[in-house]
Image (cartoon, rainbow, N blue to C red):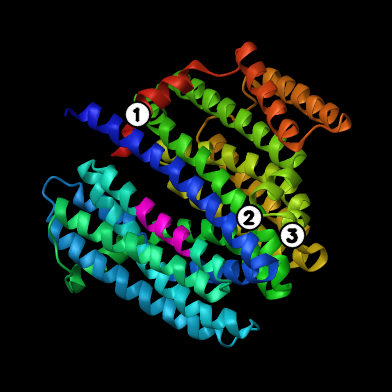
């Protein structure tokens, strides 16, 4: 298999795997929310959010450093992998255990404090899996990694269905998640060693090299996690667990929705990088404009679904007990649209080799989030958390835009804005009409989306270069 075909195959497998894991994730949310209810689901989300925050302290940017190091022609791959994985497991495990002990001093319910130790085990395994993903990335064997991820998630889902059948509570459900994550880690380890033999190694000189190279990358990643999960963390400290559970569904929808434009921006990266390397400003500006048009249309679709049909979406996924989170989901829909545009601008700055601009933008978003989360959550609870997230995403977008302007590229509305806005307006009007006619919620949810997509095609709003990047050039991201 030649390189181009291998890249295409691995990108196709990775995309298909993302679709499958997203569907399994939605089914898992449905089981958890409908069985646990708002309060215990709030416990579940609190544990995962707290532990994911603690992971920031142990991240060290190792994944990116390891992928870069093992991709060098003269790399000692077994030494790098063995040393990096041991550093990951020891570093993450010790930091998360210490964080779980710290949680005993915080105003959480006792069951949440006990769950922190299970969460620490889960995220240690998750971080190990993430590191080993570099092997499959390097060897262009994504199929095995995708299989391990799906197997673990399916096992956890089946276990949760059984536990729900017997009426188990929050801790057993969390334990099922831990078991699924451990299975994924063990399968990933076995498959990775089959592709590239290695063994765990204590290598202090190499550890120092990893830490020095990874800290700048870890800083940017840490700021991003703080923005992404800070709303639930602050909410868990200031509000009751049932409010955390209700808000957890819109927050999870944000995470799932934000993954798609980030992946799309990765598809566009080779196109932008080629234009930047060739100093072809016209080609760069044209590709950037087309990419922005695509995420703008995606953002309008998200707003159409979540802002105008949020109650139906939440009722479908989580049940009636979580419908109170619909106003927060409506606000988060606009934050999702901003996040999609920021993702494209982030990769554009990376293609221009402007990492400092990316870091400064993340820092700006973090400062806004740190100020807005406690104030707005104290005043408006779930809606305040969503409003604070929207402010943070707007700050990120402003920072990325300013960074590109400093690089000599003005960011404006793409030519497709007018037809996309027209299509969205007609779709919204269709939704309003259908509600007045009191049609079934499934019709109200699907028909406006079909109208929107159909008008986009009829008006010629989808940029051709975007389709070309997805089908050809964007596959270079698999490297």
**Which type of secondary structure does the marked residue at label 3 adopt?**
helix
Per the image, is 150 magenta?
yes
Residue denoted by label 1: 277
Point 32% across, 53% down: residue: 148
Residue denoted by label 3: 321
**Can you see residue 360?**
no
Q: In the figure, is residue 10 to the left or right of 229?
A: left
* Of callouts 1 and 2, the N-terminal one: 2
Point 25% across, 65% down: residue: 85
**Which type of secondary structure does the marked residue at label 1 adopt?**
helix
Quadrant housing the N terminus: top left
Label 2 vs label 3, nearer the camera: 3
Q: Which mark is residue 251?
A: 2
Per the image, is 446 magenta?
no
Name above or below for residue 98 compared with residue 215. Answer: below
**Which type of secondary structure does the marked residue at label 2 adopt?**
helix
Mark 3 crowdedness (10 Å alpha carbons): few <14, some 14-19, many ≥20: some
Foreground of the two, 103 or 355: 103
Q: From mark 1 to mark 2, how far is it between C-alphas? A: 38 Å
Foreground of the two, 387 or 289: 387
Q: Position of residue 110 (x, y in %)?
A: 60, 85
Q: From mark 3 to mark 1, how far is it between C-alphas? A: 53 Å
Start and end of the magenta stretch? 149-159
């Amino acid at each position: 298999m030649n390189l181009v075909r291998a890249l295409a195959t691995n990108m196709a497998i990775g995309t298909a795997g993302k679709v499958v894991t997203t569907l399994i994730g939605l089914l898992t949310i449905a089981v958890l929310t409908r069985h646990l209810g708002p309060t215990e689901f709030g416990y579940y989300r609190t544990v995962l959010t707290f532990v994911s925050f603690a992971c920031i302290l142990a991240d060290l940017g190792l994944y990116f450093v390891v992928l870069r190091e093992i991709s060098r022609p003269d790399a000692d791959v077994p030494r790098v992998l063995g040393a990096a994985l041991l550093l990951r497991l020891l570093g993450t495990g010790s930091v998360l255990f210490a964080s779980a002990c710290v949680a005993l001093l915080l105003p959480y319910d006792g069951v949440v404090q006990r769950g922190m130790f299970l969460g620490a085990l889960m995220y240690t395994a998750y971080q190990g899996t993430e590191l080993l993903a570099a092997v499959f990335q390097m060897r262009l064997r994504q199929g095995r990694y995708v299989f391990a991820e799906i197997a673990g998630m399916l096992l956890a889902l089946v276990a949760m269905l059984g536990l729900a059948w017997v009426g188990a509570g929050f801790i057993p459900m969390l334990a099922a998640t831990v078991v699924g994550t451990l299975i994924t880690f063990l399968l990933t380890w076995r498959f990775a060693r089959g592709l590239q033999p290695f063994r765990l190694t204590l290598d202090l000189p190499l550890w120092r090299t990893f830490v020095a190279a990874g800290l700048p990358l870890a800083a940017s990643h840490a700021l991003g996690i703080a923005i992404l999960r800070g709303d639930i963390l602050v909410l868990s400290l200031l509000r009751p667990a049932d409010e955390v559970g209700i808000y957890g569904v819109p927050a999870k929808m944000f995470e799932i929705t934000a993954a798609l434009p980030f992946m799309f921006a990765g598809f566009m990266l080779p196109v932008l990088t080629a234009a930047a390397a060739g100093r072809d400003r016209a080609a760069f500006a044209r590709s950037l404009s087309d990419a922005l048009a695509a995420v703008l249309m995606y953002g309008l679709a998200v707003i159409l679904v979540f802002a105008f049909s949020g109650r139906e979406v939440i009722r479908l996924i989580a049940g009636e007990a979580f419908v109170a989170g619909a106003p927060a989901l409506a606000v988060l829909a606009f934050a999702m649209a901003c996040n999609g545009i920021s993702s494209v601008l982030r990769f554009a700055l990376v293609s221009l080799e402007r990492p400092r601009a990316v870091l400064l933008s993340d820092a700006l978003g973090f400062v806004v989030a740190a100020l807005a989360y406690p104030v707005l959550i104290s005043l408006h609870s779930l809606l305040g958390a969503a409003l604070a997230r929207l402010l943070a995403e707007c700050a990120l977008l402003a920072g990325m835009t300013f960074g590109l302007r400093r690089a000599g590229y003005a960011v404006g509305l793409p030519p497709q804005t007018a037809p996309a806005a027209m299509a969205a307006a007609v779709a919204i009007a269709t939704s309003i009409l259908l509600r007045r006619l009191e049609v079934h919620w499934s019709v109200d949810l699907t028909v406006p989306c079909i109208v929107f997509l159909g008008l986009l095609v009829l008006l010629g709003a989808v940029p051709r270069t975007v389709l070309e990047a997805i089908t050809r050039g964007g596959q270079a991201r698999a490297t």
